[in-house]
Image (cartoon, rainbow, N blue to C red):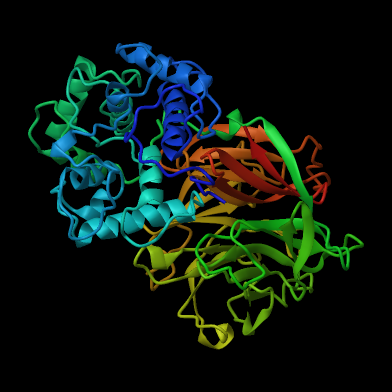
Amino acid sequence: MGNFAGQLPRVPFGSRVLRLKRPLLTGTDVKVFQRLYNTLLELMNPPNGPMGSPIPITGVFDRESQKAAANIQSYFGICVDGIVGPQTYRVMGQDNRAYGGPAFGSRSLAAPITGGDVIVLQNRLNCLRYATILNQAATGDFDTPTSKAVLAFQGDNIVYRHWDIAFDGNVGPDTFDILWITAITGGRTLHEGINGFDTAGLQVILQNLGFYSGRIDGYFGSVTRHAVKHFQEAFGITADGICGPQTFYALGRSNPVFWYSADAFPRGRIGSLSHIQVISSTIDPVNGDQNPYGVLLAPNTFDDTNTILKHGDLLVSNINNANGVMGLGSTLERIVNGRPERFFAGAMAPIAISTSNLGATWIADYGFATDGSQGLVQVISPNGTLFSGGDIHRDLFDGPWGMQFNFGEFYGLPVAFFSTNVLSGTIDRFTEFHPPDFNEDSVTLQIGSGFAHVGTNINTVFGPQGMIWLPMGDALYIADGADNSISVLAPVSTAQTDLGSGLKIYQGPPLNKPAGLGFNPENGNLIAVNQGDNRAIEINPRTGQLVSARLLDKTPVNPVTGAGSALFGVYVALDNNGELLVYFTNDNTNTVNVLTR
C-alpha cells in the first residue's frame, strides 16, 4: 500500500528532459510530473482546471503526458512544445539552479550536508507544519532540527497517507518523491512575475490564512504581492512582497497543516468520488459471524516478514453471530485476495479496532452481556493470537466502543491508545504498556467525560465512538452519535487530568448518528459515516464547515428501529498513485468496500 515507485525505474524529478519518444520514457520522475499536474488541476480550479483534464498516473510519458506538458506551457506562457525541460520544470516548482545548487533531488540529504538543495528542503518543510520543528528560516545546513522535521514529514506520510517510505530522518529517493508531490512550495524564491505551481501553493496558504482573496491561478501578480506584504507586516518581517526563506518560515509558523488544499474549494473531496467497489465479503468462513463494524488498514511500520498480518492488509471486526444476534460475534477477518480469512476468534462483541506501529491490533469489546458489564479491551499480536496478558479489564470500562492509536513514537510523544465508553460518555487512555502483559502494565486514565450517550444495551446505544488523532496540538477528534457532533480534546497524549468533553467543532445535520471517523489526508478534513442515513459526511475541523457528502448505501434507514443502517467503520488512505481511497464496512451486505474516483 502506498508504494509510489512500484516497479518503475527511480529517476529524480528534474534530472532529465521528458519528451515523447520510442521507446516511451518511464520512471518515477514521469509519475511525479503526472501526479503534480493532476494535483494542481484540482487545487487551481477543481475539478477541471484551466490547464485541461486529469491524466492517468502511470509513470509512462505518453501522448496524454505530452498534452499535459503543452497545457502547462500554454497556461504559463512559455514555449509550447510538449517537452518537459528546464522552463517547464521551473513553473512546476523544480528549479535546479535555486539557491546555488546542487539541484534538489540530485543527491541524498542527511547530516552534516550543506547546500542550496538543503535550503530547498527546509523551505518546502517550512511552508507547512514542520516550521515549528525547524524553528528557523532555511540555513542550508542539515542539522538536528532538520532531521527531526524530516522525521515528522515521513511520519505524517506513513501514518495518514500510508506511503511506504523510510522513517529515518534522511532524504532518499522515496522521500524525495513524496516531497515533490506534497510540499510543493519553497523550491525557489517567489516574487511578482514568477508564476507556477509553487505560486499556486503560496496562494492556497495565504487564502486559508485570510490574506488572499483572489483566484488560485499560479500567477504572482500585484494582488498576490499585496497579500504577501500584508502577511509579512502581520508577522513582523520585512514587507517587500517577496517570498524567500524568512517568509516561507513565517507561513509555516502560521499554517500548522501538512497538506495543500484551499478551504474555500478543497481538493480530494469525497463528494467528487464516484465509484464504490465491493472488496470482499466479511462473513467469517468458519462460524458465519457477520455484521462488520470496525475496519483498519495494517500500517507499513512493522516487520511483516514472519507475521500473518501484512502491510496494507484490511482487518474487519464482526459484531453479530451467524444467526444475526447483535453482540455475539467474536471474530476479526483479514481480507486476502478478495475473501475473508479468520484472523482472530476470541473477541467478545468486537466494535472498533486499531493498530500500533508494531502491528499489534487493539479491540474495543462491548462484551457478550447486552448491558456492557463484560466490556474489555483486547490486544492481538500480528500473528492473530491474544497476548498472554492481552485481556485488559478496568473499572473505568462501561461499554468499550471506539479505539484509536496516536503513533506517538513518530512524534516524540508517549505511545498511547484511546478507547470510548458508549454507556457513560467517557474516554480512556492507555499508556506504559509492554507486551505481553498489557493488563498488568497498562496505565489507564480517564481523559474525557460528559459526552452525550443514550441507550442501556447494545441494541439501543449511541455515544462517542469514531476517533481520529492528529499530531498538530496532540488532538483527538471524537464523533458522537447521541448528539450528532464532532468534538476535539487536546493535549490527549500528555494530559494528566480529565479534559471533559472538549470543544465541539460541529453539531447537527447532516451528521445523523455518526459512527466511524476518518481523516482525509488530501485536504485535512474529517470524514464521518452516518448510521442514520448511510451517508459519509466531510467536515473541515479548522473552520467547522461542511465540505461535502456522499451516499454510500441507498437502503432507507428506519428512524425508530434503525433497520437498514449500513455504516459503522471507515478508514482513509491513498493508493500507489496518490489517489484517495475511502474504505468502509456495510452491515446490510456484510462486505467491506472502497470509494474511489
- Please tell me which residue lies in front, 539 or 171: 171
Name the residue: 78% across, 58% down.
340
The residue located at (15%, 47%) in the rendering is 115
Residue at 25% across, 28% down = 211
Report x, y in % for residue 338. Answer: 77, 51
- Could you say where residue 205 lies in the image, as x and y percent from the top left? 31, 33
* Up/down of 256 relative to 15, above or below: below
Residue projecting furthest to the right: 323
In this rendering, position of residue 114 left or right of residue 449: left
Q: Is residue 117 visible?
A: yes
Q: Is residue 559 above or below residue 48?
A: below
- What percent of the width, then of the height, locates residue 482? 64, 52
Left or right, 55 with respect to 141, comes to: right
Query: Could you tell me which residue is drawn at 88 percent across and 63 percent down?
Result: 288
Query: Which one is nearer the viewer's eye here, 543 or 279?
Result: 279
Residue 587: x and y in percent read 79, 50
- Residue 263 horizontal side relative to residue 252, left or right: right
Residue 472 in view here? no
